[in-house]
Amino acid sequence: MSNRLHAAAEIILEPIKTESSWHAYRTPVKGYPLPTEARSSLAALVDVLNDAISQTLRAAPTLWIDSQPLHHDGGSKIFSVHSRLWSSKMGFCFDPVGEPPRKIRLSDLMDVDYGTPLKIHDRTAIHVTAFAQSMPAYRLLAGRGVSVLLYFAALGPDDPLLEAAVKQFMQHTRDHLRPLMSPGEFQNYPFYVPLLSTSSIASATAQQLAMWMGDAMVSIHESFDAKELLVLSRHSFNPTLQTAGLQRMSVADAGPWAFRNHSDQEGAP
């Protein structure tokens, strides 16, 4: 499938078939980190989606960072400078349909073919616990393929419901996602974040999606590995896309939507 994120500021969100009442969209990219102009367009899309999610679903964002690709393009320096402001907390993130995460063994080093990248399962997640910093932090990191925005039922970053929902989500992940580790491996993290993709969502049952998402209402994930932006919602997302100002590209209810970053149109090809 061709890359749908262009420097000309147009982004196409394509629907993904999902189970039950879940709804998902994605746009592929050539790879993260994105070029500067495409990064700006992606951040603009997420900004309008964030505002629309607040209006239509009464949900507030929390930011979770995949640390493995953070070293690309100065991401680690950005995190180092802002870590204290963000009040960062460390956990674990992983592909919930991949091999059970475990530490590297000597046999892994001995058996790998020359030139083949070694599969490393130890993948730290970083949670921005200063909720008011969730979107400012996302904007700084946008387009690097490190961000997972999870939305919970709350009226804003100062709503006590948001803190309670995040605590419940962390406990949910310890109860339901920690058992997906290899026996005895990575057992002591305070939370576990699933790194979802089009392939994992398309093949998942409704029960699996509920297990991965807990009480989160929406996930917006820049997937470094799958080279895509992925949106997953437990409710119909069409009203949110319409409120965000995206345009239908089909009369079908489950058709694609287009976002045009009008602030970048001047001088665009």
Image (cartoon, rainbow, N blue to C red):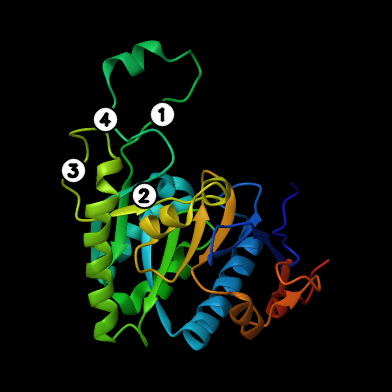
At a point 35% along the width and 16% down the height, the residue shown is 109
Give the Cα distance between marks 2 and 1. Answer: 15 Å
Q: Is residue 147 visible?
A: yes
SS at mark 4 in the image: loop
Q: What type is the residue that disc 1 sits on?
A: Lys
The residue that mark 1 highlights is 119
Q: What type is the residue that disc 3 sits on?
A: Gln
For discs 3 and 1, the disc positioned in front in the rendered view = 3
Q: Residue 5, how many percent across, how many down?
A: 69, 59
| Vertical relation: 192 (above or below) 184 | below
For discs 4 and 2, the disc positioned in front in the rendered view = 4
The residue that mark 4 highlights is 103
Task: Say few, some or many: other residues with alpha carbon within 10 Å of mark 2 (under 14 / 14 to 19 / 20 or more).
Answer: many
Q: Residue 37 carries which label?
A: none
Q: Residue 67 carries which label?
A: 2
For discs 2 and 1, the disc positioned in front in the rendered view = 1
SS at mark 1 in the image: loop
In the displayed structure image, the side of residue 140 where residue 186 appears, left or right? left
Give the Cα distance between marks 4 and 2. Answer: 17 Å
Q: Residue 196, how many percent across, how many down?
A: 47, 51
SS at mark 2 in the image: loop
Labels 4 & 2 near each other (Cβ < 8 A): no
At a point 43% along the width and 15% down the height, the residue shown is 112
In the displayed structure image, the side of residue 78 where residue 104 appears, left or right? left
The residue that mark 3 highlights is 187
| Vertical relation: 100 (above or below) 8 | above
